[in-house]
Image (cartoon, rainbow, N blue to C red):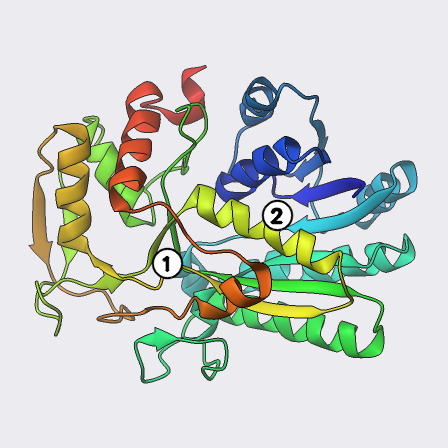
Amino acid sequence: MGKVLVTGGAGYIGSHTVIQLAHAGLEVAVLDNLSNSSRGVIARLEELTGKTIQFIHADVRDRDALRAVFSENAYEAVIHFAGLKAVSESQNEPLKYFDNNVSGSIVLFEEMMNADISKLIFSSSATVYGDPGCVCYAETTPLKPINVYGQTKLMVEDILRDIKWANPQWQIALLRYFNPVGAHESGRIGESPFGTPNNLMPFISQVAVGKREKLMVYGNDYPTPDGTGLRDYIHVDDLAAGHLAALNALSKDNSLITVNLGTGKPNSVLEMISAFEKASGVTIPYEIIGRRSGDLPEYYADAHLAKKILNWEAKLGIDRMCADTWRWQKNNPNGYCDQ
């Protein structure tokens, strides 16, 4: 396997994937516009891998920049993380999301074609399923996204399915993530959201480190064992390992692979709070408030197909997820701004 370009590689999931690619002996380049990430990530990636990571400060929508990158480097594959990911923001600013996530992807794919690169892993999402009327999502579950973010992911999936049909030599993996949490065990890289976190775990950890007064729990009247929402939380290192497994699987044939990456086991908000308190020794004050519009009571992955096709399964449980998150947050209370 040759050199791999990782778009959005300075972000949360991208950076953890870069580490695993480098440890597997691959040469890695990161392309990122730093809209929701820090350049300081690159130095930490080099520290953790002992390798030089080529960094390209560019946007996937910048056709000239992509053309220059592809003309100056020979990449065997692209892993495409770059995109906006806040569900609520996507509802309020749909054009911004269609421009970044869909138009940006089209530019990337066109320039890949021009450079004769046809191996791609796409960062998709469980939001493509929406509210299908069941709680366990298999890859065959109907796709009905209920927010703009999910719509953009499904649109890019559809584009890639059509590219594959028109260009059978393309090798494509569509990886549908559930709820990534955790951090690298070194405590050197982790989730560092700009502004108010959109996800549960960084919010809990910011309360634990004293950056926020309390956690807001949206609803405790769901038809679940403790009344709070159930989600499939997956350690970011397990998720990163799924990308390496997909890259290896694509090297064997010209497949179009579509798989869920999740644990297949849901945990509630209160369970995650309790596990974090146990890992950190810090009490997490929280307040129960009303449900958020669009939140589902429960959903989780049917993860069997990834095991069958990729020989991959999640290995790290919620105790490890919380311990790694706490180590990262405690050592970097202000994220990458602390360096």
- Residue in the image at 61% along x and 39% along y: 9
Question: Which image quarter holds the C terminus?
Answer: top left
Q: Secondary structure at mark 2?
A: helix
Nearer to the camera, 253 or 76: 253
Amino acid tagged 1 = Thr
Q: Is residue 18 above or below residue 63?
A: above
Q: Secondary structure at mark 1?
A: loop
Badge 2 is on which residue? 244
Can the viewer see residue 213 in this picture? no
Label 2 and label 1: CA atoms lie apart by 17 Å
- Residue in the image at 34% along x and 49% along y: 198
Query: In the picture provided, is 27 more to the left or to the right than 185?
Result: right
How many neighbours does mark 2 have within 10 angstroms: few (below 14), some (14-19), or many (20 or more)? many
Determine which of the numbered discs, if any, sits on residue 334 in the image: none
Query: In the picture provided, is 103 more to the left or to the right than 295?
Result: right
Query: In the picture provided, is 235 more to the left or to the right than 45?
Result: left
Asked whether the residues under the numbered discs 2 and 1 touch, taking CB atoms below 8 Å apart as contact, a structural biologist would say no
Quick one: label 2 or label 1, which is nearer the N terminus?
2
How many neighbours does mark 1 have within 10 angstroms: few (below 14), some (14-19), or many (20 or more)? many
Q: Is residue 184 above or below residue 12?
A: above
Amino acid tagged 2 = Leu
Badge 1 is on which residue? 263
Query: In the picture provided, is 133 more to the left or to the right than 222?
Result: right
Residue 102 horizontal/vertical position (percent):
64, 64
Residue 268 horizontal/vertical position (percent):
19, 58
Residue 243 horizontal/vertical position (percent):
59, 51
Can the viewer see residue 16 in this picture? yes
